[in-house]
């Protein structure tokens, strides 16, 4: 009997331990759905504020859309460090720089589609939690806590159903300048610029091509020609650059990171050193006056001297073999 009692006790304890995580309510996640009117072109895994946003934080507006927002009329917003646990009262104090209230603890009204509009990056920066000056190579993550309907006040632990978290990252660090490994002086009808893989390649979204009349990258303009995230080179024709024969121009390439709502609007690195390209006509082998083409083929089957080429002999051999097989049948 004693052994059966111990077995049942152990079984109940095990089932309870397994059931507890299953019964625990999952963390609710809100989302920043727009920055300055721009929405993500895809389901972005990370929402970024970049250097351009930080340079004008007061005029960088964003929308916050609530999950399970039915019945939520207002929210009290707090800025938190990554894993700030602002639902805990001991984190919502001035003793630790982990969580700070936004907008002087005043509530924000929830509008249509459970969305709060007109929020600014400056409000986040004013909490002194969010840093717009220095970030890691791929950005620094932060959190927005939205407490539903009531100020969290001194509540020791705000229950999961009464708040949600929106994650975002501030990244003001641009990619490094590209190291060009292709020739810096090219002539032809097509030009190719190659570079070594940047150390921060995982955070690069695309590469942009610039064109200028001098070797000064600051004087160049964007051609609108780009290469994708994993590219290590970019090719462009003379015609795409509007180059006439013997005309020259300078080309530069820059890297743009993923810190934006829209592809190509992220932090942009310095433009590379200049590549001088000159448009030239492409001639065939026998069009080159410096080449002796006395033995060049006029056609695939006839040499320049009028004798059959090796191609003609091979074709004749194949025909003979095919004819012999038919005769044997």
Image (cartoon, grey):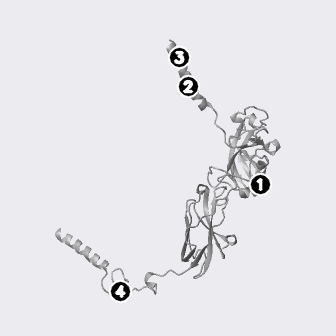
Compared to 325, does 87 lie above or below? above
- Residue receiving disc 1: 57
Could you tell me if the residues under marks 1 and 2 are in contact, i.e. CB atoms within 8 Å? no
Q: Badge 4: how crowded within 10 Å, few (<14), some, or many (20+)?
A: some
Q: Badge 1: how crowded within 10 Å, few (<14), some, or many (20+)?
A: some
* 158 horizontally vs 318: left or right: right
| Sequence-wise first label, 4 or 1 | 1
Element type where label 3 sits in the image: helix
Q: Position of residue 18 (x, y in %)?
A: 56, 29
Asked whether the viewer can see residue 106, the reply is no
Name the residue nearer the viewer: 135 or 222. Answer: 135
**Is the C terminus in the top left, top right, bottom left or bottom right quadrant?**
bottom left
How far apart, in angstroms, are the residues tagged by discs 1 and 2?
Answer: 51 Å
| Sequence-wise first label, 3 or 4 | 3
| Sequence-wise first label, 2 or 3 | 3
Q: Which mark is in front, 2 or 3?
A: 3
Q: Position of residue 112 (x, y in %)?
A: 74, 47
Q: Disc number at residue 304?
A: 4
How far apart, in angstroms, are the residues tagged by discs 3 and 4?
Answer: 101 Å
Q: Say which quarter of the image contains residue 94.
A: top right
Could you tell me if the residues under marks 3 and 4 are in contact, i.e. CB atoms within 8 Å? no
Compared to 230, does 315 lie above or below? below
How far apart, in angstroms, are the residues tagged by discs 1 and 3?
Answer: 63 Å
Q: Disc number at residue 15?
A: 2
Name the residue nearer the viewer: 53 or 42. Answer: 53
| Sequence-wise first label, 2 or 4 | 2
- Residue receiving disc 3: 6
Q: Disc number at residue 16?
A: none
- Residue visible at 53% across and 18% down in the picture: 8
């Amino acid at each position: 009997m004693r052994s059966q009692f111990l077995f049942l006790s152990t079984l109940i304890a095990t089932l309870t331990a397994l059931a507890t995580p299953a019964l625990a309510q999952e963390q609710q996640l809100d989302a920043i759905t727009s920055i300055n009117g721009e929405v993500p072109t895809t389901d972005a895994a990370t929402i970024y504020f970049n250097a351009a946003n930080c340079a004008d934080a007061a005029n960088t507006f964003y929308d916050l859309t609530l999950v399970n927002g039915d019945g939520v009329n207002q929210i009290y917003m707090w800025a938190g460090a990554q894993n700030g646990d602002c639902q805990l009262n001991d984190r919502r104090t001035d003793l630790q720089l982990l969580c700070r209230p936004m907008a002087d603890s005043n509530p924000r009204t929830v509008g249509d589609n459970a969305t709060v509009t007109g929020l600014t990056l400056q409000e986040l920066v004013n909490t002194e939690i969010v840093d717009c000056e220095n970030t890691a190579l791929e950005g620094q993550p932060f959190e927005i806590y939205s407490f539903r309907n009531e100020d969290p006040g001194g509540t020791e632990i705000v229950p999961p159903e009464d708040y949600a978290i929106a994650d975002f990252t501030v990244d003001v660090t641009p990619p490094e300048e590209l190291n060009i490994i292709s020739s810096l002086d090219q002539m032809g009808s097509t030009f190719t610029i190659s570079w070594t893989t940047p150390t921060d390649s995982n955070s690069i979204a695309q590469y942009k091509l610039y064109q200028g009349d001098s070797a000064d990258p600051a004087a160049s303009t964007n051609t609108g020609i780009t290469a994708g995230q994993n590219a290590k080179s970019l090719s462009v024709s003379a015609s795409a650059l509007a180059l006439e024969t013997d005309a020259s121009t300078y080309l530069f390439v820059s890297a743009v990171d993923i810190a934006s709502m829209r592809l190509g609007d992220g932090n942009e690195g310095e433009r590379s050193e200049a590549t001088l390209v000159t448009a030239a006509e492409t001639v065939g082998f026998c069009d080159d006056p410096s080449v002796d083409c006395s033995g060049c083929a006029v056609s695939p089957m006839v040499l320049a001297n009028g004798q059959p080429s090796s191609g003609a002999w091979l074709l004749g051999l194949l025909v003979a073999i095919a004819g012999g097989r038919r005769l044997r049948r």
